[in-house]
Image: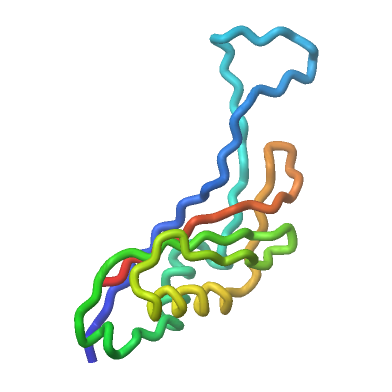
Amino acid sequence: MMNFLFYLLLFSSVHSFGQRNDNNQNLSKDSIVAVFIVSPEFPGGSGAMVEFIQKNFKHPKILMENKIQGTIWVSCFIEKNGVISEIKIEKGLFDDYDKEAIRVIRLMPKWKPGEDQSGNIKRMKYHIPIKIK
């Protein structure tokens, strides 16, 4: 049996830009305002997510035989309750691999939801690239 390696990089597509002015002070062009967000997290962290995908991803036989390689870019939302929703292939590899990526993402357990700078739980979008070698 061929040994396949998956490289999974987790990039949060959650970006917050802007300036908050609670004290009605004028912020100059040179003012620096930091916005902190706690990103959603797969139970056990990114290493556990890699293991989960490796364990559950089933390679389509014909694609294995043809040694197909590449990256599948999957986007999804992590809801306030940690459930994954709106799974979408942003950039696919082959239809069978893309369907398998969606199937595996749907199998994932609830995540720890993300928070904004005030500690409020927020729905956040994530991009998950799955590299197949």
Q: Quadrant of the C terminus?
A: bottom left
The coloring applied to the image is rainbow
Q: Quadrant of the N terminus?
A: bottom left
Where does the image place residue 76, in percent across and percent down from the top left? 57, 61
Where does the image place residue 35, in percent across and percent down from the top left? 62, 31
Q: Is residue 121 above or below residue 82?
A: above
Left or right, residue 57 beside residue 115: left
Q: Is residue 19 above or below residue 91?
A: above
Q: Is residue 17 above or below residue 74?
A: above
For the point 40% across and 61% down, the residue is: 91
Taking the view exactly as shown, the residue that stands out farthest to the front is: 95
Where does the image place residue 88, in percent across and percent down from the top left? 53, 64
For the point 68% across and 67% down, the residue is: 83
Q: Is residue 35 above or below residue 116?
A: above
Taking the view exactly as shown, the residue that stands out farthest to the left is: 66
Left or right, residue 10 beside residue 4: right
Where does the image place residue 69, in percent across and percent down from the top left? 25, 71
